[in-house]
Amino acid sequence: MLTLLSNAKINLYLEIVGSRTDGFHELVMVMQSVALCDRITLNPISGPSITINCNHPQVPTDHTNLAYKAVTLLQKRFPNRTNRCGGIEITIDKKIPVGAGLAGGSSTAAAVLFGLDILWKMGLTRLELQEVSAELGSDIPFCLAGGCAIATGRGEEVDVLPKSPKLFAVLAKYESISVSTPWAYKTYRQQFAHTYLPLDDRATLAERRARVHSSDMLKSIGARNATAIGTHLHNDLEKVVLPAHPKVTQLKSSMAEIAQTNGGIGTMMSGSGPTVFSLTETLEAAEAVKQEVRSRFNDPDLKVFVAPFTSHGIVTKA
Ligand code: C5P
């Protein structure tokens, strides 16, 4: 039996560059792991079955769960290394909100790939793990690597960045509001396709990537300048998700104001949302923002968490 902890991520920067020939979007993102984690237990069982247990009612426990797909993909890609391993029971103790823009499902899948490689003694190389994780989902290579990274392509091309300063994220999500990632990108395409780089313009794309590599956000991280990181937060998907969810728009503007008066350094929606986060430099400031958000909204549907930045994606638990 093996237990793993899989961390959530936030996007410090998310820019949609254009369309790709595979139907996905070309992205430039800066991702950061935060210490809000699910606990994944892998239990080998005899026979070929894959079973999933989860304490969260919205998480499917059948073949549509990314964790299930992670197992079958490993079996398909590496038949010689998996065919004598039997089945697996996966137990997910979920703390990361679902449908939240925090890569909860992707990080569980990353934990399953990472854990089965160990449990089944597959001896996968880092490259093999990266390739199989990229096939499974755009965010999964980052979830495996963890820490702070720039992600390009679909999001699956991950370059680890120097450690960001030790900041704290106050995360707020309405339990009853979830955003579908395909919906967010499809709606963005409907409204903003006219701003996309032409598909065949590889030169412009390379220039754009190079520009982002030397962007204000990366300079701020390189300089470990917390205030500048807070100033340069950016997420293109806010343009479609916020207008569709007025409660989230209201939450973001209140959190920005609360953060400003309580030592916060910036507020933004993460990924395809609807989680909104404020960054602070100290735990005390983060707790103050959390308390003020809770008391101002006084809504049991609004869940608020404090999660420090962490340099880990997946870790095994003794
Ligand atoms: O890769 P993943 O399964 O996480 O993507 C979910 C959906 O989000 C895709 O099916 C696609 O609709 C959209 N997406 C996109 N461009 C990306 C990543 C995701 O259009 N780079």
Image (spheres, helix red, strand yellow):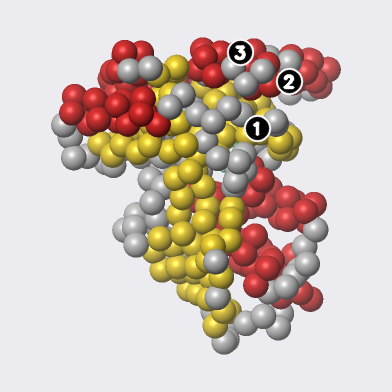
46 vs 81: above or below: below
Q: Label 3 belongs to which residue? A: 195
Q: Residues within 10 Å of mark 2 (few under 14, many from 20)?
A: some
What's the distance in space between the residues labelled 1 and 2, CA to CA? 16 Å
Is 149 or 179 nearer to us in this picture? 149
Using the image, tell me which numbered label, if any, was put on residue 163: 1
**Disc nearest the viewer among 3 and 1:** 1
Relative to residue 293, is residue 32 drawn left or right? right
Callout 2: CB less than 8 Å from ligand 1: no
Q: Label 2 belongs to which residue? A: 213
Relative to residue 22, is residue 290 drawn left or right? left
231 vs 307: above or below: above
What's the distance in space between the residues labelled 3 and 2, CA to CA? 21 Å
- Asked if residue 120 shows in the view, the reply is yes
Tally the marks.
Answer: 3
Q: Residues within 10 Å of mark 1 (few under 14, many from 20)?
A: some
225 vs 55: above or below: above
User: What amino acid is at disc 1?
Assistant: Lys
Quarter of the image for the N terminus: give it: bottom right
Callout 1: CB less than 8 Å from ligand 1: no
* Image location of residue 310, percent across then percent down: 55, 40
**Disc nearest the viewer among 3 and 2:** 2
Residue at (70%, 30%) from the top-left corner?
Answer: 162
